[in-house]
Amino acid sequence: MRLRNGQVAPLFALEDVYGRNIDLSSYKSKNKKILISFFRNVACPFCNFRIHQLTRKNKNWKDKLEMIFFLESKKEVVLRSIFHQEVSPIPIISDEKRIMYQKYGVENSIFKFLGTMLSAERRATFNKAKEMGLGIETDEKTITTIPADFLLDENLNIVEAYYGNNASDHLPFEKIEAIL
């Protein structure tokens, strides 16, 4: 079931891959918005390209926005990835059993993934990410998860629930900046 704007975000208290306790309720009333993003796995060039972009944006947004990333990959696999180690201090939470994915209504669709790969523009993004070294080799090959982003206000209410229409579709940066 998809979440909607105005709802309180499902709470969690989980350990990120770096061993830090990430308790969503502790973000309440910090006078910052919170972006929670759900990705496939460390092998996904689309996901890694978006993580790369968000990590770069974090330099400008860090006074107004906290970010939390979820990956389906095992903790050990994330930690083997030098690229993902460079994402810190942004928390990355390993959710290989997809518990939070289910609570947030993140979708699986082979049809949306195939539609992504049929688009010349998205294939170009895929190839650019691979050229940048953002397609990491692993035995994890989950491809059906469609990304989702949730922008929360200071009280943990969902300001924008964004469910991707394809495997590379995320909440547009312009929308995030407008809300910030």
Image (cartoon, rainbow, N blue to C red):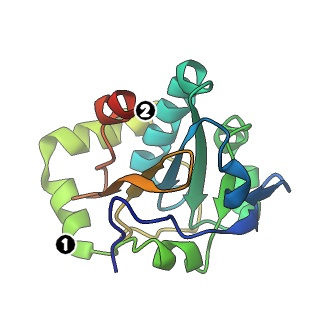
Q: Nearer the viewer, residue 51 or 36?
A: 36
Give the class, few, some or many, for how many residues have Cα within 10 Å of label 2's Cα (few <14, many ≥20).
Answer: few
Residue 46: image location, x then y, percent: 39, 47
Q: Secondary structure at mark 2?
A: helix
If you read the primary sequence from the N terminus, does the residue marked by circle 2 or circle 1 appear first?
1
Q: Which quadrant of the figure contains the C terminus?
A: top left
Q: Which residue has dot 2 on it?
A: 131
| Amino acid at circle 1 | Phe
Residue 119: image location, x then y, percent: 13, 49
Q: Which residue has dot 1 on it?
A: 111
| Amino acid at circle 2 | Glu
Q: Secondary structure at mark 1?
A: helix
Residue 39: image location, x then y, percent: 47, 57
Give the class, few, some or many, for how many residues have Cα within 10 Å of label 1's Cα (few <14, many ≥20).
Answer: few
Residue found at x 59% / y 61%: 138
Residue found at x 38% / y 58%: 148
Q: Quadrant of residue 56?
A: top right
Q: Residue furthest right?
A: 19
Horizontal relation, residue 29 to residue 149: left or right: right
